[in-house]
């Protein structure tokens, strides 16, 4: 009886939730593949059902979900997708969360508070995830919450290239909106060759998203100030920071952030402000009603697709961790 030799060919399987189909389709185009077809619907009581229409057995599965509103629904759907892939015998499951849910709750500020960012990591792992991929985490320590490899990608070059092409670099000052973002701002100064300024803000501990006072450290007079941050939510803090920069003599203020959350009346508020441009990526869906004339949205799909290729081919993702310039 002759021996039977089985050759197993590695297969990439791209899945995505319903939160941001445009981003999923863009990533698939970059990869030259398709988003796995599936059925997904909500029961009358809000429970979510999913079923993939293609075999995932033995595949290297990447499951993408964006966390716009309603964030808890999309998080639960993501977990259910991971569980479905695990039970369908995927060889490896990589969670792609361009915007990491609950990232701002990464530590306890006072007693009797949760660390929700750690809880999300635990939920991914329990559902069956082997690897996590995210873009510009709110704090680097979140990488340690997940018990497995974490691919922390940076949108810096994408954002900085737009700034470099649209503004005179010799007049730019990079501004960190608080002490926690200084390291990120320093990377911007390395890329643009610009000086650094820091805004010191004192928050009201009893009122979320409220800042009581701003102080500007650094020379911003007569300069084009680029406030760099990981996200823009209600826009209130960013606008107050811009007003502080104008009070210290800034000639123009531009905001560059990775994640455009734009909660509540953020769009009209930012449009009416003295900020000249708000630059974000499309890690989160931004519906037409939340867009405004000063908004510029840059595509994140090439960066995510490059990272997927490197992981799938067992290549190096370190250059993407460190924000080095790569061809995408």
Image (tube, rainbow, N blue to C red):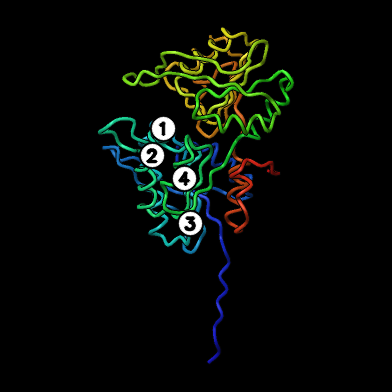
Residue 245: x %, y % from top left: 57, 12
Residue in the picture at 54% in, 36% down? 22
Q: Is residue 194 visible?
A: yes
- Give the Cα distance between marks 3 and 2: 32 Å
- Binning the other alpha carbons within 10 Å of mark 3 as few (below 14), some (14 to 19) or many (20 upward) gives few
Question: How many angstroms separate mark 4 from mark 2 (CA)?
Answer: 10 Å
Measure how far apart labels 3 and 1 are at the Cα level.
36 Å
Q: Are marks 1 and 4 in contact (CB under 8 Å)?
A: no
Indicate the secondary structure of the residue bearing disc 4. Answer: helix
Q: Earlier in the sequence, mark 3 or mark 2?
A: 3
Could you tell me which secondary element the residue under label 3 belongs to?
loop
Instruction: Residue under label 3, please give it.
Output: 54
The image's mark for residue 117 is: 2
Q: Is residue 4 above or below residue 165?
A: below
Q: Earlier in the sequence, mark 1 or mark 4?
A: 1
| Residue at 25%, 33% in the rendered image | 112
In the image, which disc is placed on residue 143?
4
Query: Mark 1: few, some, or many residues within 10 Å (few <14, many ≥20)?
Result: some
The residue positioned 57% from the left and 26% from the top of the image is 228
Give above or below for 115 relative to 319: above
Q: Which residue is painted at 44% across and 53% down in the image?
A: 52
Instruction: Look at the image and tell me whether residue 37 can be seen.
Output: no
Q: Sequence-wise, which precedes: disc 4 or disc 2?
A: 2
């Amino acid at each position: 009886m002759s021996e039977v030799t089985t050759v197993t060919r590695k297969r990439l399987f791209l899945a995505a939730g319903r939160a941001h189909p445009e981003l999923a389709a863009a990533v698939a185009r970059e990869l030259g593949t398709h988003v796995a077809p599936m059925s997904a619907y909500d029961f009358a009581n809000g429970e979510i059902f999913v079923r993939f229409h293609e075999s995932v057995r033995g595949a290297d599965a990447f499951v993408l979900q964006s966390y716009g509103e309603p964030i808890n629904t999309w998080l639960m759907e993501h977990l259910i997708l991971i569980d479905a892939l695990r039970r369908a015998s995927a060889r490896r499951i990589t969670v792609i969360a361009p915007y990491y849910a609950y990232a701002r709750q990464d530590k306890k500020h006072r007693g009797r508070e949760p660390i929700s960012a750690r809880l999300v990591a635990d939920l991914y792992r329990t559902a069956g995830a082997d690897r996590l991929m995210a873009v510009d985490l709110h704090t680097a320590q979140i990488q340690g919450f997940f018990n497995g490899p974490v691919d922390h990608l940076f949108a810096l070059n994408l954002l900085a290239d737009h700034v470099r092409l649209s503004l005179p670099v010799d007049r730019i000052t990079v501004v960190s909106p608080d002490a926690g973002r200084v390291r990120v701002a320093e990377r911007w100064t390395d890329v643009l060759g610009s000086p650094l300024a820091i805004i010191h803000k004192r928050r009201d501990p009893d009122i979320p998203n409220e800042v009581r006072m701003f102080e500007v450290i650094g020379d911003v007079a007569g300069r084009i100030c680029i406030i760099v941050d990981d996200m823009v939510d209600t826009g209130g803090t960013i606008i107050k920071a811009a007003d502080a920069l104008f009070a210290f003599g800034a000639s123009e203020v531009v905001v560059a952030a990775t994640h455009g959350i734009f909660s509540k009346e953020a769009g009209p508020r930012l449009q009416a402000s003295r900020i000249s441009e708000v630059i974000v990526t499309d890690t989160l869906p931004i519906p037409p009603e939340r867009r405004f004339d000063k908004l510029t949205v840059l595509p994140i799909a090439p960066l995510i697709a490059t990272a997927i290729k490197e992981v799938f081919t067992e290549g190096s993702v370190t250059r993407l961790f460190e924000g080095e310039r790569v061809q995408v």
